[in-house]
Image: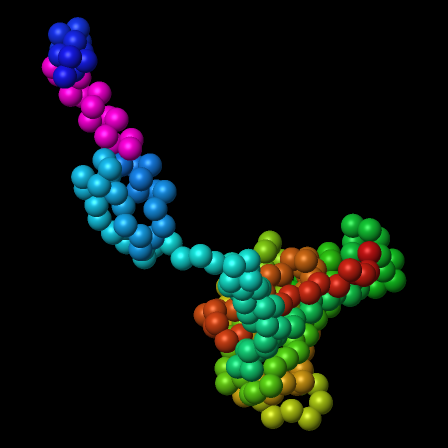
Amino acid sequence: MAVLETLITTYGLVIVVGISAVVVGIVWLISHFATKPGGKVSVLWGLTTYDRRESNDTKPTSKSEVSEPKMISIVRSVFSEGVVDSSKHVLIARIDDSLLIDTETQRACNDIAVYRKGNPLNQLAIVSLTIDLQGVTVMPMVSLHLKRKRPGEILSALPQILGEVEFHNTGTVTPLGIQIMLRNMRPGERFRLQMLTDGLRATDFHLVQEPRLSAVELRVEKSEDWQP
């Protein structure tokens, strides 16, 4: 008691009470975490006792349990990449051209000259569009638009069906180019459109799907060996 009275006289009652509370808190924390889950915690030499509960949030896991979800996700991603959607149709389009007359490069201008309505043609070329269908089912209908990317003239267009096929095709001239409709096309069948143009080459066209269908994927390839 003399020690307590000395501390109170020296530091004051508030400070002594605060220090005592901190010491009691530290002792309680040490006793709490030193006791295993489910054991009995004793604070201040048995003055206060209680049972420590097991934590529901923490669960001991082994290395195999930790790595198992990661491995499952990796396996699922690999198999999902390899699965081919049977309802998916892939249209492979190839645009190529063949230059017949080019007055700028003096190609064939000394041998032949072509006029249309009294005007000479400056760059006469044959541009061909070939479309192949890949898949496992019949494609009901698709609408493609072959658009010009710069000024030029399409003099004529001739659609061709290659081989013994049963699908139907229609073509419509638009201000930008030609609209192509393909119906009931089967995998392995092929469609070709040949155009006679003045001032337009294969790179001057852009093929798009309008409207765009999620079940049909359009892949466009261009020839790398255009004639100069």
| Residue 109 visible in this rendered orientation of the protein | no
The magenta-colored residue range is 13-27
Q: Residue at x 61, y 82 (%)?
A: 135
| Residue 209 visible in this rendered orientation of the protein | yes
Residue lying furthest top: 10
Residue lying furthest right: 111
The image shows residue 105 at horizontal and vertical percentages of: 82, 51
The image shows residue 218 at horizontal and vertical percentages of: 58, 69
Determine whether 41 is above or below 135 in the image.
Answer: above
Query: Which quadrant of the view contains residue 80?
Result: bottom right
Q: Nearer the viewer, residue 126 or 183?
A: 183
Determine whether 204 is above or below 170 in the image.
Answer: above
Characterize the magenta stretch by its predominant secondary structure.
helix
57 vs 124, left or right, is left
The image shows residue 70 at horizontal and vertical percentages of: 54, 61
Q: Nearer the viewer, residue 44 or 15?
A: 44
Q: Nearer the viewer, residue 194 or 83?
A: 83
Q: Nearer the viewer, residue 194 or 59?
A: 59
226 vs 218, left or right, is right
Q: Residue at x 44, y 57 (%)?
A: 60
